[in-house]
């Protein structure tokens, strides 16, 4: 089900495909290595520290801080109708980073490095196929979980 | 380790070349390099091709190039390291000679970026990052460098005017380079007024896709002497490093750790420091990339790249003249050819052949060629005895 992740999915087959199912259920998941306990976000199947092959998904709260961002005016295939759109890189409080769109509860024009944000799991509700992603929202934004 | 030098170099003009196939472009560069070296093809024992295959209709490009150059059955293969593919080919040829396998090897960097339809280019543009975690959000090359620029501005106070000043310099020198794609001067005001691509970068912060080829012929020291070559430029410092594909796993968003690592290797091997570099060609795929390169190469301190261009430190007469061929910005960026073309430019500078854009008396130069957003970086120190 990893083909659910992202507006355009290039990478349907992965050992962490369960990530997209959890995201659909409203849960943002990192991975914890079963052997050494290392936590990774984005999740990964193979531990870079101990080379362990077994992992368990672990839920993230999703609070974080904006590290950098840009507003993209010239877009690649599949994103033409959405320009301009703003993407930001966020350092998660629980470790690791993600890249996501700026969501509706934030003022894109006022977005700043160092700003606190909440990562919120999202469905593309206008699309018929199941497609999931996450957005950067104002701290305290809540959402439903399955 | 045997000393390896460049005995000949040549390149096509860069720009839109709707009149030629990629192997025809390669032949132009090859012919120019042979003429420059004053050797016949029979001394060249092997070829290495640097190119990025997904831009070409022809699959497995080295096969058709080696055939068209009339060099079968001598060995050939492709090296790929995104926009640093040309420097990867150069390094491979250097290794072949340094290892004692061959005495003379040709390096061909080539790219035809105008064969594809716009839709195909937009599709490729969507896969430049980590496709698993980033591309699904519509990231682009300018987008990544824009995020570096935003962070550099935040930490060091770098301005859009300083970014534009890099473009102004590179167009200034590009105007004097007959091989350059854009041969006209621009102003900071014109650059600042250009259309936004990915904030804070606009059109004049970005280099242009181009067609073109470049070729250098390498020889080991003994072979160069045996051929009677007395104006050899030596590859005395060869640095190469890597970093994460994903921007999510970068330790630094204001510079390229791979560039710093590659520079440290190249300086150590050549027995020089940054202050010894008299002329450099650096990878200005975006204006912010040149400012980061000043810092990563040690031409100025961390965060001082904006002040360095303001003080004209990268102009002729400054501490470290940079991109006197116009850089990727004005010369154009046929991605597989770029690293080899940079090498041609520094060879020409060290031989004193660059006319109005010559650094007087330069004997030590440097190339800095980045693949992707720093996944690969090659830094080489070149010297004329």
Image (spheres, rainbow, N blue to C red):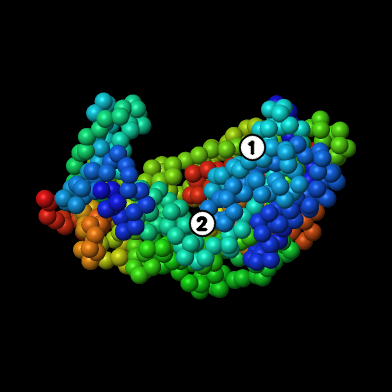
Is residue A140 something that shows in the picture?
A: yes
Q: Nearer the viewer, mark 1 or mark 2?
A: 1
- Identify the element where label 1 is drawn: helix
Q: Position of residue B72 (x, y in %)?
A: 73, 42
Q: Position of residue B67 (x, y in %)?
A: 71, 47
Q: Position of residue A146 (x, y in %)?
A: 11, 50
Residue B360 or residue B269, whichever sits in front? B269
Is residue B342 something that shows in the picture?
A: no
| Residue B312, quarter of the rendered image | bottom right
* Residue count near mark 2 (Cα–Cα under 10 Å), binned few <14, some 14–19, many ≥20: many
Number of dots carrying numbers: 2
Q: CA distance from mark 1 to mark 2?
A: 29 Å
- The residue shown at (67%, 40%) is B76
- Identify the element where label 2 is drawn: helix
Q: Is residue A45 above or below residue B325?
A: above
Q: Which residue is mark 1?
A: B92
Q: Position of residue B29 (x, y in %)?
A: 74, 53
- The residue shown at (69%, 66%) is B19
Chain for mark 1?
Answer: B
Residue A118 or residue B101, whichever sits in front? B101
Q: Which residue is mark 2?
A: B288
């Amino acid at each position: 089900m990893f083909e659910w992740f992202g507006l355009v999915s290039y990478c349907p087959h992965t050992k962490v495909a369960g990530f997209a199912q959890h995201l659909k259920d409203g849960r943002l998941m990192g991975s914890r290595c079963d052997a050494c306990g290392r936590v990774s976000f984005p999740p990964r199947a193979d531990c870079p520290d101990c080379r362990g092959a077994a992992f368990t998904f672990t839920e993230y709260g999703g609070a974080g801080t904006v590290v950098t961002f840009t507003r993209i005016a010239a877009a690649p295939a599949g994103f033409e109708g959405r320009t301009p759109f703003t993407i930001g890189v966020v350092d998660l409080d629980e470790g690791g980073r993600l890249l996501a769109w700026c969501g509706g509860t934030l003022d894109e024009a006022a977005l700043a490095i160092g700003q606190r944000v909440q990562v919120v799991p999202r469905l593309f509700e206008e699309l018929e196929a199941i497609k999931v992603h996450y957005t950067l929202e104002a701290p305290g934004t809540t959402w439903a979980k399955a | 380790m045997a000393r390896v030098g460049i005995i000949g170099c040549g390149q096509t003009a860069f720009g839109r070349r709707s009149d030629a196939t990629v192997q025809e472009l390669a032949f132009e560069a090859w012919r120019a390099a042979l003429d420059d070296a004053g050797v016949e093809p029979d001394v060249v024992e092997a070829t290495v091709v640097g190119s990025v295959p997904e831009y070409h209709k022809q699959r497995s490009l080295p096969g058709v190039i080696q055939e068209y150059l009339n060099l079968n059955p001598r060995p050939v293969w492709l090296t790929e390291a995104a926009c640093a593919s040309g420097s990867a080919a150069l390094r491979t040829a250097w290794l072949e000679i340094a290892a004692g396998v061959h005495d003379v090897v040709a390096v061909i960097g080539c790219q035809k970026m105008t064969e594809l339809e716009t839709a195909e280019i937009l599709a490729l543009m969507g896969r430049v990052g980590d496709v698993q975690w980033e591309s699904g959000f519509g990231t682009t090359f300018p987008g990544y460098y824009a995020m570096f620029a935003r962070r550099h501005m935040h930490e060091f106070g770098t301005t859009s005017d300083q970014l534009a000043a890099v473009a102004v310099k590179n167009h200034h020198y590009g105007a004097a380079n007959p091989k350059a794609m854009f041969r006209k001067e621009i102003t900071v005001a014109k650059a600042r007024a250009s259309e936004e691509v990915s904030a804070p970068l606009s059109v004049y912060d970005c280099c242009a896709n181009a067609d073109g080829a470049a070729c250098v012929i390498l020889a080991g020291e003994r072979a160069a002497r045996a051929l009677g070559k007395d104006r050899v430029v030596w590859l005395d410092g060869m640095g190469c490093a890597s970093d994460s594909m994903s921007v999510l796993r970068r330790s630094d968003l204001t510079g390229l750790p791979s560039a710093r690592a590659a520079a440290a290797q190249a300086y150590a091997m050549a027995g020089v420091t940054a202050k010894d570099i008299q002329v450099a060609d650096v990878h200005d795929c975006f204006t912010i990339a040149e400012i980061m390169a000043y810092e990563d190469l040690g031409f100025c301190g961390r965060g001082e790249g904006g002040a360095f261009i303001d003080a004209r430190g990268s102009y002729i007469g400054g501490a470290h003249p940079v991109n006197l061929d116009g850089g990727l910005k004005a010369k154009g960026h046929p991605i597989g050819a770029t690293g080899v073309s940079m090498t041609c430019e520094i060879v020409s500078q060290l031989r004193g052949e660059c006319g109005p854009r010559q650094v007087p008396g330069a004997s030590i130069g440097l190339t800095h060629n980045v693949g992707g957003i720093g996944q690969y970086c090659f830094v080489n120190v070149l010297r004329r005895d």
